[in-house]
Amino acid sequence: MSANQPSFIEQARRAQIVETTIETIAAIGLSGASLGTIAKRAGVSTGVLTYHFANKDDLIEQSIKKLFEAPNAFVVARVDGQGTHRERLRSYVTATLEFMRSNREYAVALVYCQGAAGSDANLSRMVTRHHGQIRKYVGRLLRAGQEAGEFRSFEVAPMAGLVFASIEGLMLQWVIDTDALDMDQTGEELVATMESRILVSA
């Protein structure tokens, strides 16, 4: 291990602090998530936070990174296990909604962070970058289906944006009112709507 590489214990502590930060944002919003509040919820001093993170902006950035990377890893693992491109696209939607239901705090914290991005240039850049990566991933799924002859001819970029925006809209509604939607039923309707436009055989 190099001198600059964090130890296993330091990595575990950083991960714990990030998780606590996400829980704090979900509980009281991004504006209320001060270093002092996060430290108190984590059961440590603010000095511990600033030992592991340069400042609050660094901690928030790492937390937002986790908010996107955790569901992405969950979804990709399930998509990659599917055979046809139709199954992969369906799995992308259902796995995304599954992660959301199982990790509500992540969904709530993500909505808070995305909502604040409009008035914070650095936050906006972070969210924009992650959104772009997701749209590109969906675009690759769609393009691969076209190349395999399973999907119709359509413009990939706007369709990828529409798929991503539909899921983001479901997340926002569900965060605001958990009982507003039956997520299983809504997910099935979303998949059916996409397939009616995308599949060659539809």
Image (cartoon, helix red, strand yellow):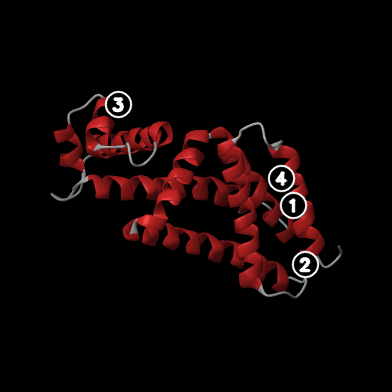
> Which residue is labeled 4 in the image?
187
Rounded to the nearest angstrom, the CA distance separating label 2 from label 4 is 21 Å
Tag 4 secondary structure: helix
Rounded to the nearest angstrom, the CA distance separating label 4 from label 1 is 6 Å
Q: Position of residue 122 (x, y in %)?
A: 32, 59
Q: Which mark is residue 41?
A: 3
Residue 194 relative to residue 41: left or right: right
**Label whose residue precedes the other's in the sequence (4 or 3):** 3
Give the vertical position of 129 relative to 157 (above or below): above
Label 3 neighbour load within 10 Å: few <14, some 14-19, many 20+: some
Q: Which mark is residue 42?
A: none
Q: Is residue 81 visible?
A: no
Rounded to the nearest angstrom, the CA distance separating label 2 from label 1 is 15 Å
* Residue at the image point whose x is 67% and y is 45% from the top: 94
- In front here: 100 or 81? 100
Residue 27 relative to residue 41: left or right: right
**Label whose residue precedes the other's in the sequence (1 or 3):** 3
> Which residue is labeled 2 in the image?
150
The C terminus lies in quadrant: bottom right
> Which residue is labeled 1 in the image?
191
| Rendering quarter of residue 196 | bottom right
Rounded to the nearest angstrom, the CA distance separating label 3 from label 2 is 50 Å
Q: Identify which amino acid the numbered label 1 is placed on.
A: Val
Give the vertical position of 143 relative to 96 (above or below): below
Q: Identify which amino acid the numbered label 4 is placed on.
A: Gly
| Rendering quarter of residue 16 | top left
Say whether marks 1 and 3 touch (CB < 8 Å). no
| Rendering quarter of residue 161 | bottom right
Rounded to the nearest angstrom, the CA distance separating label 4 from label 3 is 35 Å
* Residue at the image point whose x is 58% and y is 51% from the top: 168
Label 4 neighbour load within 10 Å: few <14, some 14-19, many 20+: many
Q: Identify which amino acid the numbered label 3 is placed on.
A: Arg
